[in-house]
Amino acid sequence: MSIFTKIIAGEIPSYKIAENGMFYAFLDIFPSALGHTLVVPKIEVDKLFDLPANYLAGILPFAQPIATAIQKAYEYNRVNIITIGFEVPHAHIHLLPMNSMKDMNALAKKITITPEALKEVQQKILEHL
């Protein structure tokens, strides 16, 4: 069972942003920028493109209002999608706030953030959802 499956099941706490029958979105606790959010399917499949077609078709519509809320909450230039997937064997996308091409290497650098600050980020994004 992956760490994401445990988060979805509530066995590990998370800073939930959104959830529906197919997906769960939560803040990355080792973010590259304020608002960095992970979107994961509720089924445990390792590779994104091994997901059933309905999950592939549904992940972007699920992520769209979250990305919009992140962008409004922090006034980033844009929120991009990164799909690396090596760190956890559970398909997922990173919603990564960016201001310029310099931020393309963002996953290589992490910011230090306290649980209290993560809660503030969560609340700020939720206000815009």
Image (tube, rainbow, N blue to C red):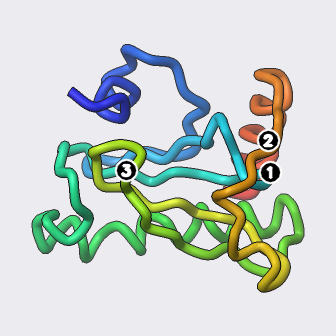
- In terms of image quadrants, where is residue 100? bottom right
- Tag 3 secondary structure: strand
Which residue is tagged 3? 40
**What whole-number distance in Å separates the C-alpha atoms at marks 3 and 1?**
19 Å
Q: Nearer the viewer, mark 1 or mark 2?
A: 1
**In the rendered structure, which disc, 3 or 1, sits on the residue that comes first in sequence?**
1
108 or 4: nearer the eye?
A: 108
- Tag 1 secondary structure: loop
**What whole-number distance in Å separates the C-alpha atoms at marks 3 and 2?**
19 Å
Identify the residue at horizontal 64%, vertical 58% (top origin). Answer: 107
Q: Are marks 1 and 2 in contact (CB under 8 Å)?
A: yes
- Tag 2 secondary structure: helix
Q: Which mark is residue 121?
A: 2
Q: Position of residue 49 (x, y in %)?
A: 20, 71
Q: Position of residue 48 (x, y in %)?
A: 26, 65
In the rendered image, which quarter contains the C terminus?
bottom right
Identified by mark 1, the residue type is: Leu
Q: Are marks 3 and 2 in contact (CB under 8 Å)?
A: no
**In the rendered structure, which disc, 1 or 2, sits on the residue that comes first in sequence?**
1
Which residue is tagged 1? 34
Q: Which mark is residue 19?
A: none
- In terms of image quadrants, where is residue 56? bottom left
Identified by mark 3, the residue type is: Val
85 or 43: nearer the eye?
A: 85
38 or 124: nearer the eye?
A: 38
**In the rendered structure, which disc, 3 or 2, sits on the residue that comes first in sequence?**
3
Identified by mark 2, the residue type is: Val
